[in-house]
Image (tube, helix red, strand yellow):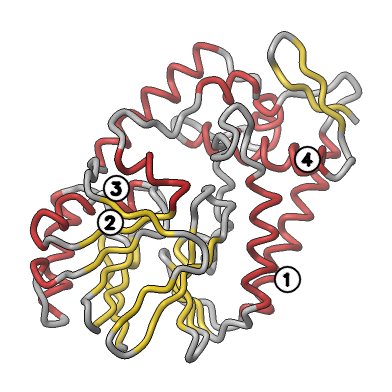
Amino acid sequence: MRIEKLVVPTPFPVGPINLYLIVDDPLTLVDTGPKTDETIAALRSEFERVGFRFKDIGRIILTHTHEDHCGLAAMLQRESGARVYVHEWELPNLTTRGVTRVNRLLLARAGVGSEFLDQIASRYERIHDYAEVVEDVEAYGDEQEFIFASGALRAIHTPGHTPGSCCLLRESNRLVLSGDTILKTITPNPVLNPDPIDPERRFPSLGEYLVSLARLRELAPTLLRTSHGDDVTDYEEHFHRLVRHIQERQSKIIGFVPKGGVTAWQMAEKVFPAVKDIHRFLAVSEAVAHLDLAAAEGRLGIETRDGVDYYLR
């Protein structure tokens, strides 16, 4: 089994994305890049560089359904007839028209006013143009094996960045394709999402992310090939650095909570005062995640006032 890294541009602040082509039978692409002319041209060039064309793809595995990871799945399926796979919790994101990352109910509960709600929603409507609905998709679950002629990759469900985020493990050498779960120089945003089991609730993204980090640690990976930036070669060191960063931010956020309580939106403005545009959504996601984790651990209380959650010391 040979794994080729294909690097293509994205229109997002995170920069280029690393896709992975598993050169085996079936030829398998892990993630696709966003739907832009520049990405399509770059991906064709990358395929030619390693001796293949789009029509040769037999299978597409998505680590999650953010547009830079899934945007070209429909186009590549049309050109190749490849099967497309995504974790079961994110299947509707890929197959249903009009699904948006901006959940107005959850944002309102976080204290986001109607004016900013409209701004955030309109910004993300434009981002949705970078992906296309895929009508023929197969859901996969935790521990599912993707079989190749010379080996297998095992899906490891690592929720946190999104509810259905997954890594792929090659058992023989403990190599991991980590998607956005592990990035060398970036702490993945714990994006605000409804819980797949109970959509009326917020998904406990940061708590689940910490569990995912620990689960990966138990696998003792030798190399993690990430979706943005360089590989991670020492996961033990990376794990401790990530956990320390999360704990430091958690303490900072708890320290900012006033006696009268604070909403997640107010906390986002306090911790990230300079953010604008779509970054407002990521900022409030980060604030909600930390405040919810502190509440779950008994370090803060939550009180709902007129449909808005306030966090109290």
Tell me which label, 1 or 4, sits earlier in the chain.
Answer: 1
Mark 3: give few (<14), some (14-19) or many (20+) Cα within 10 Å: some
Question: In which quadrant of the rendered view does residue 308 lie?
Answer: top right
Identify the element where label 4 is drawn.
helix
Residue 232 makes an appearance in the image: yes
Q: State if disc 4 and disc 1 touch (CB < 8 Å).
A: no
Sequence-wise first label, 2 or 3 = 3
Nearest the eye: 245 or 311: 311
Could you tell me which residue is drawn at 36 percent across and 87 percent down? 151
Which residue position holds label 4? 253
| Image: 151 above or below 302 | below
Mark 3 falls on what kind of element?
A: loop
Residue type pointed to by label 2: Gly
Q: Earlier in the sequence, mark 3 or mark 4?
A: 3
Residue 111: image location, x then y, percent: 65, 19
- Cα distance, mark 3 to mark 4? 31 Å
